[in-house]
Amino acid sequence: MTFDAEHPDRSGCPAGNTDRVLDVLQREAVRATVFIQGRWAEAHPATARRIAGDGHLVGHHSHYHARMPLFNDDGIVSDVTVAQQIIHSITGMDPRPWFRCPFGEGHDDPRVLRCLAALGYRDVHWDIALEDWEPWRTGAAIAADAISGVRAHGDGAVILLHTWPAGTADALGPMIAGLREIGASFVTVDQLSRAD
Ligand SMILES: [Zn+2]
């Protein structure tokens, strides 16, 4: 399971949703990979610190959450470097080498990937997106789609989730139970041996 911890891109998201997500992961003893946006961490330092304190693997989700291909090379260096310092100073964790491009844009762009690599990062894309960012997506639907998606994909499936939608927090308990039922176990991306 991977989460993007960032400013919501929809209005009306419940305050404290990230803590609800972290509560379920803690209760279920699931370690996830959490890609943290620099500006979000600045605004929510206690929650960002909790992500690391709870034992999740900390990754980097840019500073401004802009589409990385829109930056020139210097722009990428500056966005990534600023957020890296913020994430490190708040969480105590160095997010390298784990990076997730906002909106996934740039994950197949050689220039973006080369710039990220020069900064010590590799992009972590996903296999299964659940549209958990859409406000009409219920927890039940997100959980059901996660389970069928992982069943179809098989081993090593990377699931994309977000920390701010209410539906995601609602989905997590049943999702974890259902995935365990089909034999899944939960690892962080550093435990996956993947070429991408
Ligand atoms: Zn994002």
Image (cartoon, grey):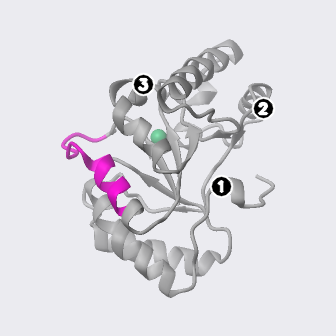
* Residue in front for this viewpoint, 165 or 47: 47
Q: Is residue 178 left or right of residue 19?
A: right
| Residue 40: % across, % down | 39, 30
Q: Is residue 15 magenta?
A: yes
Decide: few, some or many residues near mark 3? Use Cα within 10 Å; few <14, some 14-19, many ≥20.
many
Circles 3 and 1: CB distance less than 8 Å?
no
Within-10-Å neighbours for mark 1: few <14, some 14–19, many 20+:
some
Residue at the spot of label 1: 189
Q: What span is in magenta?
A: 10-24
The answer to which of marks 3 and 1 sits earlier in the sequence is 3
Determine the CA span between mark 3 and mark 1: 23 Å
Image point (27%, 49%), residue name: 17
Q: Amino acid at mark 2?
A: Ala
Residue assigned mark 3: 39
Work out how far the residue at label 2 is from the one at label 1, CA to CA, in angstroms.
17 Å
- Label 3, label 2: how far apart the Cα atoms are: 22 Å
Q: Is mark 3 within 8 Å of ligand 1?
A: no
> Is-magenta flag for residue 166?
no
Q: Disc 3 or 2, which lies upstream in sequence? A: 3
The numbered mark at residue 62 is: none
- Nearer the camera: disc 2 or disc 1: 1
From the viewer's side, name the closer residue of 95 and 132.
95
Q: Residue at x 33, y 39 (%)?
A: 8
Q: Say what amino acid the circle numbered 3 marks.
A: Arg
Residue 102 location, x and y as percent? 53, 37
Q: Amino acid at mark 1?
A: Val
Q: Secondary structure at mark 1?
A: helix
Structural crowding at the residue carrying mark 2, measured as other residues with C-alpha within 10 Å and reported as few (<14), some (14–19) or many (≥20): some
Q: Which residue is mark 2?
A: 117
Give the percent coordinates (x, y) of residue 43: 34, 26
Point out the tag, 2 or 1, that comes first from the N-terminus: 2
Q: Tell me the element at label 2.
A: helix
